[in-house]
Amino acid sequence: MQPIGQFAINRAEVTIGQFARFASATGFVSQAERSGRGLVYAAGWEQKAGWTWPFPFGRPGGANEPALHITFDEAQTYCRWAGKRLPRERERVAAAYTETRPAPPSPFEQGRTYPYPTGDSPKGAN
């Protein structure tokens, strides 16, 4: 967990391994699993057959890879099970767009909120 002001946020995404423990413990089945396809944003939203959280690109994902193809409500359900919650919008912006490191590398400035997680330019953002 990374403390940021009055809240803390995980340093990395929830992994397939973590999500698998939740699914196993609760019997959870995602919307993507029920429909047999996940949503991907390419040239607009597209449904990809066989793409689900255990098969993020239509093939088995590794236990340390991020869990994908999970809806907002499903993510909230996981968070409650894990004793956590999703960040509020202002918290998400603070965590992703505001420079909080005490001595950030150039050209970043401590305390500044940037338009992109990568700074002033989207270059390098996923």
Image (spheres, grey):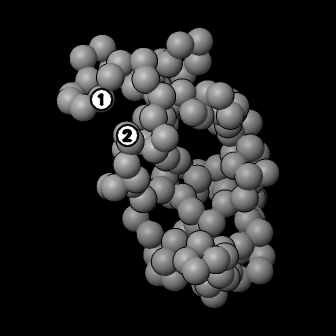
Task: Judge whether 123 appears above or below 55 on screen.
Answer: above
Q: Position of residue 107 (x, y in %)?
A: 24, 32
Q: Residue furthest bottom?
A: 49
**Residue 78: x %, y % from top left:** 69, 45
Q: Nearer the viewer, residue 100 or 109?
A: 109
Image position of 113 with respect to 55: above or below: above
x, y (%) of residue 31? Answer: 77, 69
Image x and y of residue 41, in percent = 59, 72
Q: Quadrant of residue 92?
A: top right
Q: Amino acid at mark 2?
A: Gly
Q: Residue at x 44, y 69 (%)?
A: 61
Q: Which residue is mark 2?
A: 119
Assess disc 1: are there few (<14), some (14-19) or many (≥20) residues with their C-alpha within 10 Å of its C-alpha: some
For the point 20% across and 30% down, the residue is: 106
Q: The C terminus appears in which quarter of the rendering?
A: bottom left
Left or right, 64 with respect to 102, comes to right
Does the image show residue 12? no
Q: Name the amino acid, label 1.
A: Phe
Mark 2 and mark 1 residues within 8 Å of each other at the beta carbon: yes
Regarding residue 66, the answer to whether it shows in the image is: yes
* Residue at figure coordinates x 73%, y 65% from the top left: 30
Mark 1 element type: loop
Q: Residue at x 54, y 22 (%)?
A: 8
Q: Is residue 83 left or right of residue 14?
A: right
The residue tagged with tag 2: helix, strand or loop? loop
**Neighbour tally class for label 2: few under 14, some 14-19, many 20 plus, Cα within 10 Å:** some
Mark 1, residue position:
108
Q: How many marks?
A: 2
Kindly indicate the quadrant of the structure image that contains residue 100: top left
Depth order, front residue of 104/76: 104
